[in-house]
Amino acid sequence: MGRIFAVTILVIAIGSAIPILRHTWWMPQDISTHGAPIDEQMSETMAEAGICFLASQILLAAFIWKFSNPKPDSKIKTFPGGASGLVIAAFLLVGTEVLALGAFGAKAWAKIYFTPAAANALPVQAQAGQFAFYFRYPGPDGKFGPIHPDMVSEANQNFYGIDINNDQDAKDDIVTAEMAIPVNREVNLLMHSKDVGHSFFVPELRVQQDFVPGLDVAIHFTATKIGRYEIVCTQLCGLGHYNMKAYLSVMSQQDYDDWLKKEAALQ
Amino acid sequence: MTIRLRIAGLLAALLSISVLALFSASKVRAAGEGKITGTIKLDGTPPHQRPIDMSKEPTCQQQHAGHPITTENVVVGPNNAIQYAAVYITEGLAGAAGSTVPSQTPTFDQKGCQYIPHVMALDVNQHFKVVNSDQTSHNIHPTPKPGGPNHEWNKSQPPGAPPFDVFWTAEEAIPVKCNIHPWMHGYMVVVKGPYGVSDNNGSYTIENVPPGNYTLTAWQETYGTQTQKVTVGSGKPATADFTFKAK
């Protein structure tokens, strides 16, 4: 019976490693300039965790196989005692591994998140609210009008609470339900939440950033491939969370200019 | 007399009594019935209505292909007629006419990620049904004034879910929204007594108004309310037209 269990463990361990080794459910194609170190870090984490996982499962199976039929007079050792050397070695090995992953990961993270956006980056605002995203472009003046929370209205489609009649900076602001950006141009995304915690996740862009209520969070990225991608909320935010999404269109500069003109006409 | 005959006799008596009762009731009503009709117009240029981007919900977007939906703050038909204005009696209703709750249960439908009708008038305590005709989940979120007699609620209704049967207990124009589709917006206008809502020609009809002198109120979501005095004579419908001035 014990030996059947050992074999089962081996089969499950190897079976679950195969799709990971073959990249069956790997992330979609990377369309960002900053994605390479993230993917590398991800592969490294998967490889190291995978080796540890397989090694421990094989060891477990081997021990079960060997000790599944103990002799009646054999003694059972308890910790601390006979195996303490082995346990301390495992602690050190796994600890170093986790620390090393953290140290290298933080470096990759800092390279993307702790650098400011380029001065000529395209500013776009993203607002998350239960249960939709809305985006704002500053228009030709390059300035976002101030937000008046008391003017937020579903009836007028004024999701940002901007006062186009009285605020000079708000007059040419463009609010959209879909996000469009030009290809190969850095975007400085300024994020704020209207209510609770949300997240902005575009798998292809390797960008996943939380909206934190009360904080203005900025993140910058450059998309390198034209296409239409899904933006999803990955922070459980309420009953409509599953349906909280929008689309990101990466366009040629010409298409983007046309799109913005069209959206401006609809305001 | 056999039992069977006795039952038949009883039934016949019951039937004739109920027919008589029905006849006399309708007669009474016909004698007292009056109605108020009129049209609602806009003086000036209607404000710009923003087109709505429903790309988030493709099943709804497809339904509006070719004729994009806009906001409905001021919906204007031919000859500057205002649609979705609610007209009701605010003074002069006495007795039964003011306290009878209509037995009809109107439907507040969610179709193509829009509320149909955009404005639904209701009597206090009149039951209505909330229906989801879409292939997506909606949440119905009426937002009466906080602290008022009506209480805010927020219920989710997946596709195919049974209708909700609900009612309001006090007079109020209650905005309704859907948090999953933030562009959805409508009103439930709860009034006391008979009411009418203007159609796309701006005309409205208030039925079952007993003869008398009344103050009539017209409500429009952007322009607010207007009042007018009107007299309903016996068997003579009264007319009351309203004109809202564009801001």
Image (cartoon, rainbow, N blue to C red):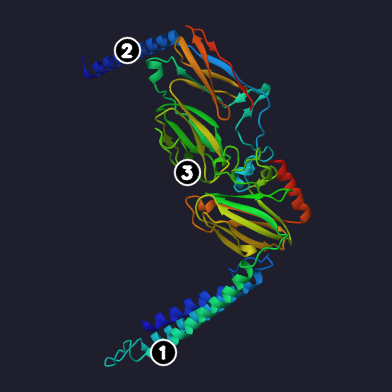
Closest to the camera, between mark 2 and mark 1, is 1
Q: Are marks 2 and 3 in contact (CB under 8 Å)?
A: no
Closest to the camera, between mark 3 and mark 1, is 1
Give the residue type at disc 3.
Answer: Gln
Is residue A54 something one can see in this rendering? Answer: no
Label 1 SS: helix
From the viewer's perspective, tell me whether residue B103 is left or right of residue A235. Answer: left
The chain to which mark 1 is attached is A
Give the residue type at disc 1.
Answer: Leu
Residue A121 x, y percent position in the rendering: 71, 59
Q: Which residue is mark 3?
A: B157
Is residue A67 something one can see in this rendering? Answer: yes
**Cα–Cα span, label 2 and label 1:** 98 Å
The answer to whether marks 3 and 1 sit on the same chain is: no
At a point 57% along the width and 56% down the height, the residue shown is: A216
Residue B150 x, y percent position in the rendering: 41, 34
The chain to which mark 2 is attached is B
Category of crowding for the residue at label 2, using alpha-carbon neighbours closer than 10 angstroms: few (below 14), some (14–19), many (at least 20): few
Residue A138 x, y percent position in the rendering: 69, 49
Residue A236, placed above or below residue B96: below
At a point 41% along the width and 24% down the height, the residue shown is: B103
**Cα–Cα span, label 2 and label 3:** 45 Å
The front one of B10 and A60 is: A60
Q: Which mark is residue B3?
A: none
Label 2 SS: helix
Q: Which residue is mark 2?
A: B17
From the viewer's perspective, tell me whether residue B13 is left or right of residue B196. Answer: left
Residue B78, placed above or below residue A241: above
The front one of B245 and A61 is: B245
Q: Which residue is mark 1?
A: A86
Category of crowding for the residue at label 1, using alpha-carbon neighbours closer than 10 angstroms: few (below 14), some (14–19), many (at least 20): few
